[in-house]
Amino acid sequence: MTTAIEVISRGLGTGSIYALIALGFVIIYRATRVISFAQPALMLAGAVLVTYLVGPLGFYAAVVAGALGTALLAAAAERVAVRPMIGRPVFTIAIITIGLDVVIRVIAIAFIGTDLPQIGDPWGLKTVNVFGATLEQRHIAMVVTTAALVAALFGFLRYTRIGLAMRAASFDQEAAMAQGVSVGAVFAVSWAIAGGLAAIGGVFAASGGTGVSGTMWIIALVALPVIILGGLDSLVGALIAGLFVGVIQSTVAHFQQYFPSWVGGNVAVISPYVLMMIALLVRPYGFFGTREVERV
Protein backbone atom coordinates (compact mmCIF):
# COMPACT_ATOMS: atom_id res chain seq x y z
CA MET A 1 0.00 0.00 0.00
CA THR A 2 2.77 2.42 0.93
CA THR A 3 4.60 1.62 -2.31
CA ALA A 4 1.47 2.40 -4.32
CA ILE A 5 1.10 5.75 -2.56
CA GLU A 6 4.73 6.62 -3.29
CA VAL A 7 4.43 5.64 -6.96
CA ILE A 8 1.21 7.65 -7.38
CA SER A 9 2.75 10.63 -5.59
CA ARG A 10 5.74 10.66 -7.95
CA GLY A 11 3.41 10.28 -10.90
CA LEU A 12 1.14 13.12 -9.84
CA GLY A 13 4.16 15.35 -9.29
CA THR A 14 5.57 14.66 -12.75
CA GLY A 15 2.08 14.76 -14.22
CA SER A 16 1.60 18.25 -12.80
CA ILE A 17 4.48 19.46 -14.97
CA TYR A 18 2.94 17.83 -18.02
CA ALA A 19 -0.45 19.33 -17.18
CA LEU A 20 0.92 22.88 -16.89
CA ILE A 21 2.68 22.64 -20.25
CA ALA A 22 -0.34 20.99 -21.87
CA LEU A 23 -2.67 23.71 -20.56
CA GLY A 24 -0.51 26.25 -22.39
CA PHE A 25 -0.80 24.25 -25.62
CA VAL A 26 -4.57 24.08 -25.27
CA ILE A 27 -5.04 27.76 -24.37
CA ILE A 28 -3.13 28.87 -27.46
CA TYR A 29 -4.89 26.33 -29.67
CA ARG A 30 -8.33 27.43 -28.48
CA ALA A 31 -7.48 31.05 -29.28
CA THR A 32 -5.63 30.64 -32.58
CA ARG A 33 -6.42 27.08 -33.79
CA VAL A 34 -2.65 26.58 -34.06
CA ILE A 35 -0.45 24.28 -31.99
CA SER A 36 2.42 26.34 -30.60
CA PHE A 37 5.66 24.39 -30.64
CA ALA A 38 7.37 27.19 -28.72
CA GLN A 39 6.24 25.85 -25.34
CA PRO A 40 9.40 23.78 -24.65
CA ALA A 41 11.61 26.84 -25.21
CA LEU A 42 9.41 29.01 -22.99
CA MET A 43 9.65 26.39 -20.28
CA LEU A 44 13.45 26.44 -20.49
CA ALA A 45 13.63 30.24 -20.67
CA GLY A 46 11.43 30.60 -17.59
CA ALA A 47 13.57 28.20 -15.56
CA VAL A 48 16.78 29.98 -16.64
CA LEU A 49 15.30 33.35 -15.70
CA VAL A 50 14.43 32.08 -12.22
CA THR A 51 18.02 30.94 -11.64
CA TYR A 52 19.17 34.54 -12.20
CA LEU A 53 16.46 36.06 -10.01
CA VAL A 54 16.52 33.66 -7.07
CA GLY A 55 19.66 35.21 -5.57
CA PRO A 56 18.44 38.81 -5.22
CA LEU A 57 14.72 38.07 -4.81
CA GLY A 58 14.44 34.75 -3.03
CA PHE A 59 12.74 31.66 -4.41
CA TYR A 60 9.05 32.53 -4.30
CA ALA A 61 9.45 36.10 -5.58
CA ALA A 62 11.81 34.82 -8.27
CA VAL A 63 9.22 32.28 -9.47
CA VAL A 64 6.54 34.97 -9.72
CA ALA A 65 8.89 37.39 -11.48
CA GLY A 66 10.18 34.62 -13.77
CA ALA A 67 6.65 33.58 -14.72
CA LEU A 68 5.69 37.20 -15.46
CA GLY A 69 8.87 37.74 -17.46
CA THR A 70 8.26 34.60 -19.51
CA ALA A 71 4.64 35.67 -20.04
CA LEU A 72 5.86 38.99 -21.45
CA LEU A 73 8.37 37.17 -23.65
CA ALA A 74 5.63 34.89 -24.98
CA ALA A 75 3.28 37.81 -25.66
CA ALA A 76 6.05 39.70 -27.45
CA ALA A 77 6.89 36.65 -29.56
CA GLU A 78 3.24 36.31 -30.54
CA ARG A 79 2.98 39.97 -31.48
CA VAL A 80 6.18 40.05 -33.53
CA ALA A 81 6.27 36.65 -35.21
CA VAL A 82 2.82 35.05 -35.08
CA ARG A 83 0.18 37.74 -35.39
CA PRO A 84 1.43 39.07 -38.75
CA MET A 85 0.88 35.54 -40.10
CA ILE A 86 -2.79 35.38 -39.12
CA GLY A 87 -4.83 34.40 -42.15
CA ARG A 88 -2.02 32.32 -43.59
CA PRO A 89 -2.25 28.51 -43.68
CA VAL A 90 -2.16 26.90 -40.24
CA PHE A 91 0.85 24.83 -41.26
CA THR A 92 2.81 28.02 -41.97
CA ILE A 93 2.06 29.47 -38.54
CA ALA A 94 3.02 26.18 -36.87
CA ILE A 95 6.39 26.32 -38.65
CA ILE A 96 6.83 29.87 -37.35
CA THR A 97 6.33 28.61 -33.78
CA ILE A 98 9.00 25.96 -34.38
CA GLY A 99 11.34 28.76 -35.44
CA LEU A 100 10.48 30.67 -32.28
CA ASP A 101 11.22 27.58 -30.22
CA VAL A 102 14.68 27.20 -31.76
CA VAL A 103 15.58 30.88 -31.37
CA ILE A 104 14.39 31.19 -27.76
CA ARG A 105 15.94 27.86 -26.79
CA VAL A 106 19.36 28.70 -28.25
CA ILE A 107 19.43 32.05 -26.46
CA ALA A 108 18.30 30.47 -23.17
CA ILE A 109 20.96 27.75 -23.39
CA ALA A 110 23.62 30.45 -23.87
CA PHE A 111 22.72 31.78 -20.40
CA ILE A 112 23.04 28.36 -18.74
CA GLY A 113 26.80 28.05 -19.07
CA THR A 114 28.81 24.94 -18.34
CA ASP A 115 27.36 24.29 -14.88
CA LEU A 116 23.82 23.29 -13.99
CA PRO A 117 22.37 26.42 -12.35
CA GLN A 118 20.01 25.71 -9.47
CA ILE A 119 16.63 27.33 -8.93
CA GLY A 120 17.08 27.31 -5.15
CA ASP A 121 13.80 25.58 -4.33
CA PRO A 122 13.16 25.09 -0.60
CA TRP A 123 12.15 21.44 -0.94
CA GLY A 124 15.22 19.78 -2.39
CA LEU A 125 14.91 16.06 -1.74
CA LYS A 126 13.19 16.50 1.63
CA THR A 127 10.51 13.94 2.40
CA VAL A 128 7.44 13.69 4.57
CA ASN A 129 5.79 10.56 5.97
CA VAL A 130 2.13 10.08 4.99
CA PHE A 131 0.35 6.90 6.12
CA GLY A 132 3.70 5.17 6.32
CA ALA A 133 4.70 6.22 2.79
CA THR A 134 7.71 8.44 2.17
CA LEU A 135 6.71 11.28 -0.16
CA GLU A 136 8.95 14.00 -1.55
CA GLN A 137 7.87 17.47 -0.52
CA ARG A 138 8.45 18.82 -4.02
CA HIS A 139 5.90 16.42 -5.48
CA ILE A 140 3.31 17.58 -2.97
CA ALA A 141 4.19 21.20 -3.80
CA MET A 142 3.79 20.47 -7.52
CA VAL A 143 0.30 19.03 -7.08
CA VAL A 144 -0.88 21.76 -4.71
CA THR A 145 0.51 24.56 -6.91
CA THR A 146 -0.98 23.07 -10.06
CA ALA A 147 -4.37 22.74 -8.37
CA ALA A 148 -4.23 26.40 -7.28
CA LEU A 149 -3.16 27.59 -10.74
CA VAL A 150 -5.89 25.58 -12.47
CA ALA A 151 -8.51 26.96 -10.09
CA ALA A 152 -7.24 30.49 -10.75
CA LEU A 153 -7.24 29.87 -14.50
CA PHE A 154 -10.81 28.60 -14.57
CA GLY A 155 -11.90 31.51 -12.39
CA PHE A 156 -10.15 33.92 -14.74
CA LEU A 157 -11.86 32.44 -17.79
CA ARG A 158 -15.26 32.41 -16.13
CA TYR A 159 -15.45 35.70 -14.26
CA THR A 160 -13.16 38.25 -15.93
CA ARG A 161 -13.91 40.32 -19.00
CA ILE A 162 -10.86 39.19 -20.94
CA GLY A 163 -11.48 35.59 -19.84
CA LEU A 164 -15.01 35.69 -21.22
CA ALA A 165 -13.62 37.25 -24.41
CA MET A 166 -11.15 34.36 -24.71
CA ARG A 167 -13.97 31.85 -24.33
CA ALA A 168 -16.06 33.65 -26.93
CA ALA A 169 -13.17 33.81 -29.40
CA SER A 170 -12.48 30.10 -28.92
CA PHE A 171 -16.00 29.29 -30.15
CA ASP A 172 -16.23 31.72 -33.07
CA GLN A 173 -13.65 34.42 -33.77
CA GLU A 174 -15.73 36.27 -36.34
CA ALA A 175 -18.79 36.39 -34.10
CA ALA A 176 -16.62 37.54 -31.20
CA MET A 177 -15.14 40.34 -33.32
CA ALA A 178 -18.65 41.41 -34.34
CA GLN A 179 -19.44 41.79 -30.62
CA GLY A 180 -16.44 44.05 -30.10
CA VAL A 181 -13.96 41.47 -28.81
CA SER A 182 -10.33 42.33 -29.60
CA VAL A 183 -9.05 39.06 -31.04
CA GLY A 184 -5.52 40.44 -31.04
CA ALA A 185 -5.71 40.98 -27.29
CA VAL A 186 -7.06 37.45 -26.89
CA PHE A 187 -4.08 36.07 -28.81
CA ALA A 188 -1.61 38.04 -26.69
CA VAL A 189 -3.17 37.04 -23.37
CA SER A 190 -3.36 33.41 -24.45
CA TRP A 191 0.33 33.32 -25.26
CA ALA A 192 1.17 35.18 -22.04
CA ILE A 193 -0.75 32.69 -19.89
CA ALA A 194 0.85 29.77 -21.73
CA GLY A 195 4.30 31.29 -21.19
CA GLY A 196 3.71 31.79 -17.48
CA LEU A 197 2.49 28.22 -17.02
CA ALA A 198 5.46 26.90 -18.98
CA ALA A 199 7.86 28.82 -16.74
CA ILE A 200 6.35 27.34 -13.57
CA GLY A 201 6.51 23.90 -15.16
CA GLY A 202 10.19 24.53 -15.86
CA VAL A 203 10.81 25.48 -12.24
CA PHE A 204 9.26 22.22 -11.07
CA ALA A 205 11.25 20.22 -13.61
CA ALA A 206 14.48 21.74 -12.29
CA SER A 207 13.60 21.28 -8.60
CA GLY A 208 15.07 18.76 -6.21
CA GLY A 209 18.65 19.65 -7.11
CA THR A 210 18.17 18.59 -10.73
CA GLY A 211 19.20 22.02 -11.99
CA VAL A 212 18.55 23.65 -15.34
CA SER A 213 20.16 21.90 -18.29
CA GLY A 214 20.06 22.58 -21.99
CA THR A 215 18.12 19.35 -22.57
CA MET A 216 15.42 20.04 -20.00
CA TRP A 217 13.05 21.25 -22.73
CA ILE A 218 12.60 17.63 -23.84
CA ILE A 219 10.32 17.13 -20.83
CA ALA A 220 7.81 19.48 -22.44
CA LEU A 221 7.50 17.17 -25.47
CA VAL A 222 5.49 14.76 -23.33
CA ALA A 223 2.77 17.42 -23.32
CA LEU A 224 2.06 16.49 -26.96
CA PRO A 225 0.77 12.98 -26.08
CA VAL A 226 -1.09 14.62 -23.18
CA ILE A 227 -3.06 17.00 -25.41
CA ILE A 228 -3.77 14.17 -27.85
CA LEU A 229 -5.19 12.10 -25.01
CA GLY A 230 -7.12 14.93 -23.41
CA GLY A 231 -8.19 16.73 -26.57
CA LEU A 232 -6.63 19.74 -28.26
CA ASP A 233 -9.38 22.10 -27.12
CA SER A 234 -10.08 20.76 -23.63
CA LEU A 235 -8.54 22.39 -20.56
CA VAL A 236 -10.05 19.73 -18.30
CA GLY A 237 -8.68 17.06 -20.63
CA ALA A 238 -5.18 18.58 -20.47
CA LEU A 239 -5.24 18.50 -16.67
CA ILE A 240 -6.61 14.96 -16.30
CA ALA A 241 -4.48 13.52 -19.11
CA GLY A 242 -1.34 15.18 -17.74
CA LEU A 243 -1.81 13.63 -14.31
CA PHE A 244 -2.79 10.29 -15.86
CA VAL A 245 0.31 10.15 -18.05
CA GLY A 246 2.50 11.03 -15.08
CA VAL A 247 1.04 8.21 -12.98
CA ILE A 248 1.38 5.73 -15.86
CA GLN A 249 5.03 6.71 -16.35
CA SER A 250 5.76 6.35 -12.66
CA THR A 251 4.03 2.97 -12.52
CA VAL A 252 5.88 1.65 -15.58
CA ALA A 253 9.20 2.88 -14.17
CA HIS A 254 8.48 1.09 -10.89
CA PHE A 255 7.76 -2.23 -12.62
CA GLN A 256 10.54 -1.84 -15.21
CA GLN A 257 12.70 -4.38 -13.38
CA TYR A 258 10.15 -7.10 -14.08
CA PHE A 259 10.04 -6.53 -17.84
CA PRO A 260 11.99 -8.82 -20.18
CA SER A 261 15.39 -7.47 -21.19
CA TRP A 262 14.51 -7.28 -24.88
CA VAL A 263 12.07 -4.38 -24.29
CA GLY A 264 14.96 -2.18 -23.16
CA GLY A 265 15.38 -0.02 -20.10
CA ASN A 266 13.38 3.05 -21.11
CA VAL A 267 9.84 1.75 -21.34
CA ALA A 268 8.64 4.53 -19.02
CA VAL A 269 10.03 7.13 -21.43
CA ILE A 270 8.09 5.80 -24.40
CA SER A 271 4.90 4.96 -22.50
CA PRO A 272 3.26 8.39 -23.15
CA TYR A 273 3.80 7.98 -26.88
CA VAL A 274 2.35 4.47 -26.82
CA LEU A 275 -0.72 5.89 -25.10
CA MET A 276 -0.85 8.62 -27.75
CA MET A 277 -0.88 6.11 -30.60
CA ILE A 278 -3.63 4.11 -28.92
CA ALA A 279 -5.66 7.28 -28.38
CA LEU A 280 -5.28 8.29 -32.01
CA LEU A 281 -6.64 4.92 -33.08
CA VAL A 282 -9.53 4.87 -30.60
CA ARG A 283 -10.41 8.55 -30.04
CA PRO A 284 -8.65 10.80 -32.60
CA TYR A 285 -10.16 13.93 -31.01
CA GLY A 286 -9.10 12.96 -27.49
CA PHE A 287 -11.20 11.68 -24.63
CA PHE A 288 -12.36 15.18 -23.71
CA GLY A 289 -11.94 16.97 -27.04
CA THR A 290 -14.66 18.25 -29.33
CA ARG A 291 -15.47 15.96 -32.21
CA GLU A 292 -15.45 17.87 -35.48
CA VAL A 293 -17.77 16.75 -38.26
CA GLU A 294 -16.78 17.79 -41.77
CA ARG A 295 -18.75 17.43 -44.98
CA VAL A 296 -17.04 15.73 -47.88
Image (cartoon, rainbow, N blue to C red):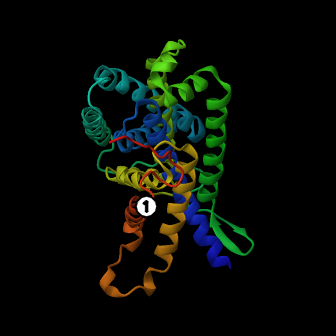
Seen from this angle, which residue lies furthest front? 296
Residue 16 position in % (x across, y down): 55, 53
Residue 11 position in % (x across, y down): 55, 64
In the image: residue 179, left or right of residue 105: right
Q: Residue at x 44, y 41 (%)?
A: 25
Which element is circle 1 on? helix
In the image: residue 288, left or right of residue 104: right
Q: Residue at x 49, y 36 (%)?
A: 27
Towards the viewer: 188 or 119: 188
Quarter of the picture containing the C terminus is top left
Towards the viewer: 162 or 70: 162
Whether 212 is drawn above or below 67: the answer is below
Seen from this angle, which residue lies furthest right? 131
Task: State whether residue 160 appears in this view.
Answer: yes
Residue 199 position in % (x across, y down): 47, 40
Q: Residue at x 43, y 61 (%)?
A: 279
Q: Which residue is mark 1?
A: 279
Picture quadrant where residue 73 is located: top left
